[in-house]
Image (cartoon, rainbow, N blue to C red):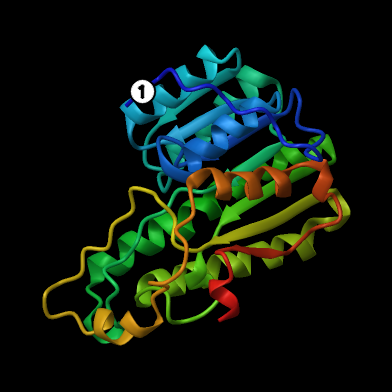
Amino acid sequence: MSTTATAPVGPPGVTGLDGRSVVVTGAASGIGRAAALRFAGVGARVLVADLNRDGAEATVKAIENAGGTARAVVGDLSEPDVVDEVVSTAVDAFGRLDVLVNNAGVMDRMSALGETADDEWERVVRINLTAPFLLTRAALPHMFVAGRGSIVFTAGEAGLRGSAAGAACTAAQHGVVGLVRSLAVMYRRAGIRANAIAPGNTLTGLRVEAGPDAHGPDVLAPYVDVGGRVSLPEEQAAAIVFLASDAAVGINGAVLPVDHGWSAV
């Protein structure tokens, strides 16, 4: 992986992120890496969190090579000790925690509920729903002290309907949407905003590894956005940074599809 990429210049209208402390999970590659680079490009200091050490360190190096500031924490974000390390490292290194991007996630095997194995269910729910819950809970006290904060989740099309993934991923992503809306209601008076993007087909490293006899892929095949445009990670990152910025100060509890119209079909 190249480590010489430069952080892109922030787009017009994205304000209030210069000097802010930002945590981005799943930032070793794909949408998370693109978001980390984009935040750095508008002057934010970025904590890169991922299970992939080489990828996380490459993202940090790319930011530093472009003149930005970044740190990395490597580990399983569903483990409380790793969550505590992420938050404490961001606060110790940058003095505060302003923005949390809960982006890390995995895809299921497109399994229908009746064929979903325990290990598939537990892995997907643990990474896609429990991990962002734990990290958000750990970040909130620091946002309370500051009197403000922005939390952005990557929910996905499976958080909007039942035809974009298997049972495990669909349930977990619907849970993420519930977290977003609960946070928006509970903490709006504390100056904390929570929103999500729902990416459509995007060029990332996520792969579906369905079993040869799986029922789900056959059922879901007619609904897959085969004719739609595949997004680049940078397009999703632009939406994440916008929602985190002061340009979106009036947006709270929203789930923004970034899918070239797939969700409107």
Q: What residue type is labelled 1?
A: Ser
Left or right side of 190 for 76 = left
Residue 168: give x, y in percent of width and height: 36, 72
What's the residue at 50%, 31% (across, down)? 48
Q: Quadrant of the C terminus?
A: bottom right
Q: In this view, does 76 lie above or below 63?
A: below
Residue under label 1: 2
Element type at mark 1: loop
Left or right side of 184 for 115 = left
Q: Nearer the viewer, residue 147 or 265?
A: 265
- The quadrant holding residue 36 is top right
What's the residue at 44%, 55% (across, down)? 202
Residue 151: give x, y in percent of width and height: 67, 48
Residue 113: give x, y in percent of width and height: 31, 83
- The quadrant holding residue 234 is top right
Q: Which of 236 and 169 is in front in this view?
A: 236
